[in-house]
Amino acid sequence: MKKASHISFFVLFTVGILLNSCQEKSAKVYTEADVNIIPKVAHLNITEGVFQFNENTVFVVSNEEQKQAVKLLIDKFNNAANWNLKITAKTPTSNYISLALDNSLEQEAYTINASTSHVVLKASSASGFLYAIQSLRQLLPVEIESDTLIKNIDWEIPNVQITDSPRFKWRGLMLDVSRHFFGKDYIKETIDMLALHKMNILHLHLVDDQGWRIEIKKYPKLTEIGAWRVDQEHLLWNAREDNNPDDKGTYGGFLTQEDLKEIVAYAATKGVEVVPEIEMPAHVSSAIAAYPELSCHGEQIAVPSGALWPITDIYCAGKESTFEFLENVLLEVMDIFPSKYIHIGGDEATKTNWEVCPHCKKRIKAEKLENVEELQSYFIKRIEKFINSKGKKLIGWDEILEGGLAPEATVMSWRGVKGGIEAAKHGNDAIMSPVGYCYFDYYQGTPDLEPKAAGPVTTVSKVYQFEPIVGELFQEEEKHILGGQANVWAEHIPTEEHSQYMIFPRLTALSETLWSPKESRNWNDFSVRLKSIMNRFEYLDVNYAKSAYIINSKVKTDIQSKSVAITLQNEFPDSDIRYVLNDADLNSEAIPFTKPIVVNRTTAIKASLFEADKPINHVFKETITFHEGVASKVDYLTNYHERYQGSHAFNLVNTLRGSKDFRDGRWQAWLNKDAKVVVDLGEEKNISKVIIGSMVNQKNSVYYPTEIKVLLSHDNENFTEVGKIKKPFKVDDEPELKDFSIDFKAQKARYIKVEAKIDKSDIEVKEAWIFMDEILID
Ligand code: ACM
Ligand code: ZN
């Protein structure tokens, strides 16, 4: 008895623990914070309980499209859970996911209703069901992305009611496969990733100067010659040399019509439409290399291996044979791509050959055109007529607005959003793809820490601020803004891994700007979900950038206390950033960053993101160099340019040094004028040295000053020159930073005047910028 009671106590105790743990498990209360779906759904409601997948869960479908949609999850469970979930047409009593047609829902809309016994997905179209499945996927633990068995995990989702639909109907990504060639498998992988993000357009940039990438059966030389260039891959894009047309090209490749049809069919099963871009009249050196008669001059040219600017070898707009060629090409293109849209480029044509070409001149006269801009407009309108006659619509970059817009054309606005607004006001459709937000060939973090890229920095949080509807558009005009698109120009992107790196996670941010209601946009909320989807990327083996974790600094200057306050941050709020000063080691004793670090003497700061008490990721290092001028009043005798204002009044005395990226917000710049400033130390100080921080970047018209003078004064009226540097103009290729140091006999002064100038008689240029980041006074 005694023993028995002992046993029963033991049994009860054990059962109690088991019951308890079961209860604990099933009692997990989900909240909105557990739902990490990107793009954020329009409406979400969570109720108590979960739907638990197990090996007997079935999918109830009523047609092939629905079968196709559920295949994604069946494959995922097959890999991660080792279950072979079945599809059925008959609804069981419980433990099922059913797909039900609901024609009251809009084209791309869907709903999810998950209860403990079953889940119902509703939509009116194939794409709606695909999106519902993608949301279901993202409701499941991230481990569902694993391609090997995961044990000890509950494959459950919270009981939710979701109603969702996209804000914009064009949610695109452009892959440039010309500048560097990426193959069929990578393109399909990219389609899978678009589908995960409910993006629905893949724009393939198939033609450019440096490579023709689509097989055209009537013109085989386009790919025999135009798809290949002399291999200069060991050189940076802008450093590549001109090729001789007789040299054989060995770098390149192209997609056959079969490849492309396969891509199109694959994309269709994922809810993605493939839009081809066949550039004209410019960006076609590859075509002219294959068929020289397409240009005005008809001379043999080579396929360039790198940068080409300006682009003067363009199709002749005078010869009828040009249009015959293009119509034949487009007929084959339309046979491959069922999309309603054909993108014809239309950007960046330098029309100097048209000015002198007898055929083009004849055309201008015959068509009563004013100039070559109107000739481009004639060109595009003629092509549009042909495309329309085949039941398709033309898209072009915003240059197609110049000289008169084709009547039905859709404008892809890349030079900002201006072109898109103009098109919408004109009654034409537009797609917003402004360089500042949507060019994914730009850096996504501090350039020094990133692979070589184009342009300035476009961080993931900046992409998240992208808004396609801007400017004063009436409601009727707003309807013409179809949506937005990111473009991955591939000049500086030699490999597929690198391409993926440039796309993610920026595309993740873009997807939410294009899908989710504008009111729900919130970076802090998104950034939590971003971390969650990054865990999916880990399982999916996606080479995404982690630049958003990298720490950078911001400085505030205090004139009263003559100190600077440093803020350390990365793109994620609530990051565990810790730092040490000077020689200390960055270890578990490091100081958590919770408020700005106030510094009033030269100080080195080391910081890192911490996880589990250990520094991870890149170590941030910055030395705040103090000098007599820090936090002094600066009087600008000549104003800096509005484009480069740095941190305004204290920029030159805030200790913050600029990087080689002249747009990093740490530089002030003067255009075509001398830079003249006076630093007021507030009191007389003994000084013997002034250092001026500057940079050169001649490609961007930034030059070193050719002369810098330093003058001192006690009263801000009478100045005495104490030193001068003359630096004769020199052709420097690579951007560089330089401190110009002017030493002189120690003396007392309160006012220090710096005058920097560029002698334009030395440099025959229209634009000359002087850049300064700091004036160090000691
Ligand atoms: C473009 O970036 N030239 C469209
Ligand atoms: Zn011509």
Image (spheres, rainbow, N blue to C red):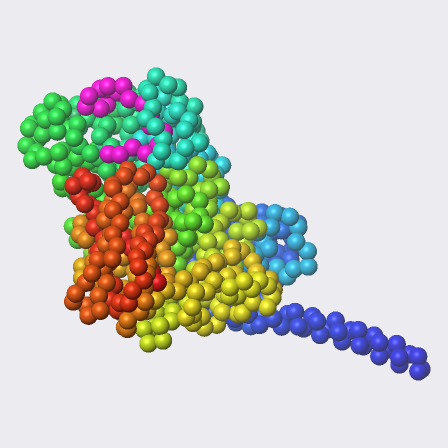
Q: Is residue 248 visible?
A: yes
Horizontal side of 517 relative to 586 (left or right) equals left
- Residue 408 lies, in percent from the top left, at 20, 43
Left or right: where 365 falls relative to 459: left
Residue 103 pos. (x, y %): 39, 56
Does residue 45 sit above or below 54 in this rendering? Answer: below
Closer to us: 533 or 309: 309
- Write the residue at 32% across / 62% down: 746
Depth check: 310 or 430 in front? 310
Instruction: Using the rendered view, name the quadrant where residue 202 is placed.
Output: top left
Residue sticking out furthest to the bottom: 2
Magenta segment: 292-310
Residue at 42% across, 39% down: 493
User: Does 97 appear above or below 29?
Assistant: above
Where is residue 478 drawn, in percent x and y? Answer: 23, 57
> In the picture shown, does residue 64 fall above or below 714?
above
Q: Is residue 274 covered in magenta?
A: no
Residue 307 colored in magenta in the image: yes
Residue placed at 56% from the left, 64% from the top? 584
Quarter-of-image position of residue 356: top left
Q: Quadrant of the N terminus?
A: bottom right
